[in-house]
Image: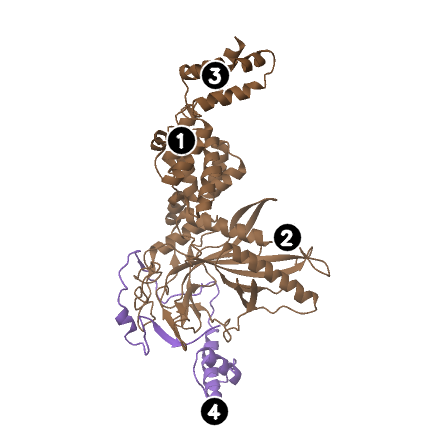
Amino acid sequence: MSYIIKGQTGDWEVVIGLEVHAQVTTKAKLFSGAPTDFGAGPNTQVSFIDAGMPGMLPVLNAFAVEQAVKTGLGLKAKINRRSVFARKNYFYADLPQGYQISQYDQPIVGEGTIILDMPEGSRNIGIERLHLEQDAGKLVHDMHATKSFVDLNRAGVALMEIVSKPDLRSPEEAGAYLRKLRAILRYLGTCDGNMEEGSMRCDANVSVRPVGSTELRTRCEIKNVNSVRFVMMAIDHEAKRHVEVYESGGAIQQETRLYDSARNETRSMRSKEMAHDYRYFPDPDLLPVELDEAFVADLEKNLPELPDDKKARFQKAYGLTAYDADVLVSEKENALYFEDVAKGRDPKQAANWVISNLFGVLNKQGVGILESPVSAKNLGRLIDLIADSTISGRQAKEAFEAMVESGKDTDTIIAEKGLKQITDTGPIEAAIDQIMAANADKVEQYRSGKEQLMGWFVGQVMKATQGKANPALCGDLLKKKLAQ
Amino acid sequence: MSPTFSIDTATVRRIATLARIEVTDAELSTWAEQLSGIMGWIEQLKEVNTDGVAPMSGGTDLKLTLRPDVVTDGDMVDQVLANATEAQDGFFTVPKMVE
């Protein structure tokens, strides 16, 4: 048990469940033909259905159903062959229908599992359910002194609400869960996982209990935290708040709280009156969703390789360590890049270049692999040139830095910088002869036993060849000549 | 017959609030009585034996109609905002609401 809160009355552990709203990757909305692109002008992506106009009827987007089922399969979850859309009733300015079409007691996907690789070992986190629902519109509060502005572009966009079981026991596990879920969604292509643009949002249910206890105490729900780091900070803060309340003799009220990242604290949302009486009932505009076995089987057969499987394959096929494999599979694009570089080359060397050199550069520049200044083809070529002794490891590093700087291809950089390693014995021997002739005293000292002078000779040869002599070859030739 | 399931005035007030319907105190008892009457009719339905019959989610044997994932709608701000009372810069506007 890694995360323990030391209280005055004893040790406490935290119990966390996460609800993730993931925007389903579709062109059109869940129940209308309006587009879903991010960043369009206000209310330009709104149909009469999304605007809640009287008499408009929702028609379910078939691809959204497919995406939800695919996600369920990726989470190794039970696919419910029959599910039902229900109305969740509440009034809010971003919800023109006066209800959200969601799923209640019969969601499209049931229980599943996400496996986390934690430093202490792997942990299986249960998925409670996944259901489809509509997103609400967006409210803008800072455009007018007395009015809020309403943009319905997002209203009706398809969301998957993915609910975990209360299996998470630390902020770190919550962070790992979110990163793993995001990776799975991105591998599947069912959600782009972009937390900044709001296409993945997270609510955290947090409670605490004394270590050793199995009770579930009253939880608080922290709403809409928009980065993995903030989710972790919000949980840590909230758990400590609960311990303080209990230890000072108070009680926790079940409520919704907002996380304020600027102050690193949560505070009570002065909640919408009776907001939790949603009066769900089956939506009479929509019939139950019935999936036939062949449809599900076909999606399952065509599922892409997911992070866990890819990691296992990387370890087995390429002989990578668990850590390196984990780093490489965390993003689908990184894994693809690595495999391009590794193809037909030494995989460990490829992994080393990608992880130690390339990722270092990308992190520093704050860009992803798709914006990498060095393509997989060019990095591969660089490794080839080391393998066939055209350049030394040191020259490769120099070339790599220049490639990062200029974006030019490997061969151009090698030519421009004259980085070819001298592997012909001729020029190296000539240099050695010259140096030996000019330093007869040192040759004498070496021959009479001062063998540490070898380093000095190698240095001189490298200097004479502008660093281009193959160091190993240089050493061999020197040894031979000095011994004569 | 007398209703076996009665709705009191407090429940009527709560339902009215949730539905944003203004009901005066004078109206409460009338609504309570009428709603209790309706519930009484529903109670009668319980007399029908429905053992082994799955609850119905739709009124027909039709299958759900699906749409392909194709953009066919939107791009009509003016029409969408046509009935809005105080539209501004392409937005609907409402009295300021901040948590």
State which mark lies toward you, 3 or 2: 3
Comes first in the chain, label 3 or label 1: 1
Residue that badge 1 annotates: A382
Residue that badge 3 annotates: A435
Q: Are marks 4 and 3 on the same chain?
A: no
* A469 lies above or below A180: above
Residue that badge 4 annotates: B26
Nearer-the-camera pick, B93 or B35: B93
Rounded to the nearest whole Å, what is the CA distance between mark 3 and mark 2?
64 Å
Q: Position of residue A194 (x, y in %)?
A: 42, 54
> At 28% from the left edge and 69% from the top edge, which residue is drawn?
B77
Q: Are marks 4 and 2 in contact (CB under 8 Å)?
A: no
State which mark lies toward you, 2 or 1: 1
Subunit bearing disc 1: A
* Chain identifier, brown in the render: A
Label annotation for residue A249? none
* Chain identifier, purple in the render: B
Subunit bearing disc 2: A
Amino acid type at mark 4: Ala
Comes first in the chain, label 3 or label 2: 2
Residue that badge 2 annotates: A3
